[in-house]
């Protein structure tokens, strides 16, 4: 089916969205991962290359566009780069392009965030036991969320994205 289509009109947007949809429909990613990738797309939509035909995108276009990402956290920048890489990988897979600048180290100039990275510290075993004891006996509104986070290691956003089929 794809071989009879004019692949020269495939945009980066089409390829990224197709790749994410295919991952989800083939159970390669969970619904929470799918939701996270859709949130990342909201940032990528601001880039000029997102709506460009992938065959017309140059390395300079990519590097110029991603330079605006400095206002986001480094973890978000990483997710954006990973998603852009996914679109180019899909382009390679569908034989829309025969080269991806994301496959050669050093070509993509990933910007560093203007924001300082947050230092994350885990609770001590003793503090964790106190917290669990408190949560089990309290009527705190977010009790279940914190208990799930503690027992599974999931982030709050991942917990909130869970649905009944994930349990």
Image (spheres, rainbow, N blue to C red):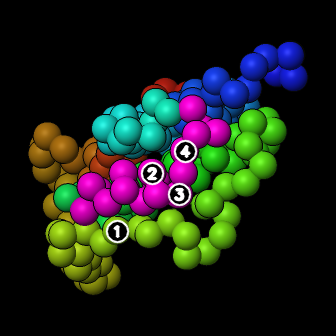
- What SS does tag 4 mark? loop
Report the span colored magenta.
53-70
Q: Residue at x 79, y 17 (%)?
A: 5
Q: Position of residue 70 (x, y in %)?
A: 25, 62
Mark 4 vs 3: CB contact within 8 A: no
Residue drawn at (55%, 70%) of the image: 107
Per the image, the residue denoted by label 2 is 61
Quarter-of-image position of residue 101: bottom right
Of the numbered discs 3 and 1, the one sitting upstream in the chain is: 3
x 31%, y 82%: residue: 125
Location of residue 78 (image quadrant):
bottom left
Report the Cα–Cα distance between label 3 and label 1.
14 Å
Q: Can residue 94 be seen here?
A: yes
Q: Where is residue 118, by image quadrant?
A: bottom left
Report if residue 68 lies within the magenta region: yes
Residue denoted by label 4: 57
Mark 1 closeness class: few <14, some 14–19, many ≥20 residues within 10 Å = some
User: Which of the numbered marks, if any, corresponds to residue 111?
Assistant: 1
Nearer to us in this view, 144 or 105: 105
Q: Is residue 121 above or below residue 107?
A: below
| Cα distance in 3D space between marks 3 and 2 | 5 Å
Pointer 3 and pointer 2: residues touching (CB < 8 Å)?
Answer: yes
Q: Say which label, 4 or 1, has the lower sequence index.
A: 4
Question: Which of label 1 and label 2 is nearer to you?
Answer: 2
Q: Nearer the viewer, mark 3 or mark 1?
A: 3
Q: Kindly check if marks 1 and 2 are in contact, taking CB atoms under 8 A apart as contact.
A: no
Label 1 element class:
loop
Distance Cα–Cα, label 4 vs label 3: 7 Å
């Amino acid at each position: 089916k794809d071989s009879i289509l004019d692949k020269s009109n495939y945009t980066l947007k089409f390829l990224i969205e197709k790749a994410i949809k295919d991952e989800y429909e083939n159970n390669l990613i969970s619904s929470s991962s799918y939701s996270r990738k859709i949130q990342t797309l909201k940032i990528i939509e601001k880039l000029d290359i997102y709506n460009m035909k992938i065959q017309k995108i140059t390395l300079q276009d990519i590097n110029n566009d991603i330079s605006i990402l400095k206002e986001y956290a480094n973890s978000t920048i990483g997710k954006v780069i990973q998603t852009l890489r996914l679109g180019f990988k899909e382009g390679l897979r569908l034989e829309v392009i025969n080269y991806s600048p994301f496959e050669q180290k050093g070509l993509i100039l990933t910007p560093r965030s203007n924001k300082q990275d947050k230092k994350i510290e885990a609770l001590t075993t003793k503090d964790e036991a106190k917290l669990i004891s408190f949560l089990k006996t309290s009527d705190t509104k977010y009790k279940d969320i914190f208990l799930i986070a503690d027992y599974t290691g999931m982030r709050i956003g991942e917990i909130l994205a869970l649905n009944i089929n994930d349990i």
